[in-house]
Amino acid sequence: MSVKKTGSPLASGAEPIEQLGAKENIARADAVDKKFEAALADAAAELNQPGGATATEGKLQAEFRRIAGTTNFDSPEGEAAAIQESAHALVHSRLGAGFRKTAQGREVAAKLSKYVASDPFLHRKLREILHQLR
């Protein structure tokens, strides 16, 4: 019987095992980030168009305007709550109409909005949009 020796007597010879599906989860998270970044870019672009407050204004932009108008930005808690609420509005706007009304849809919206609000890049973008609308 032969035994395979390692190069070093201190090495265990064990190779690290990658967690199953780790690459797929990272790729999926990157895709989610890109979709929310695109949604925020669309909302920001609408703000820069002349006549942005017309009747043709998007529902998301109208919701962001409502949130910005009712938020006390001098309070860190108020700003954090506004960013969480705007993240929820963003996620909610991206869900299908039928799925939004289900319990599972509400749960997904709640979890994703926490994710969006906690992401540093998306958090900063939401804050910039809300300050611009103020």
Image: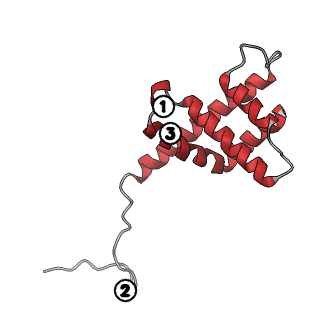
Instruction: Report helix, strand or loop for mark 1.
Output: loop
Q: Which corner quadrant of the image does residue 72 belong to?
A: top right
Which quadrant is home to the C terminus? Answer: top right
Seen in the picture, residue 20 relative to 7 is either above or below; the reply is above
How many numbered marks have been drawn onto this rendered protein structure? Answer: 3
Mark 1, Cα crowd under 10 Å, few <14 / some 14-19 / many 20+, is few
Q: Position of residue 113 (x, y in %)?
A: 59, 43
| Residue under pointer 1 | 101
| Amino acid type, label 2 | Pro
Which dot, 2 or 3, sits closer to the camera?
3
Rendered residue at 77%/47% (across/down) = 79
Instruction: Please give the label number shown on residue 31.
Output: none
- 117, above or below 20, in the image: above
Mark 3: which amino acid?
Arg
Say which amino acid is labelled 1: Lys
Residue 97 versus residue 50 in the image, above or below: below
Residue position marked by numbered label 3 in the rendering: 106
- Which colour style is shown? secondary structure
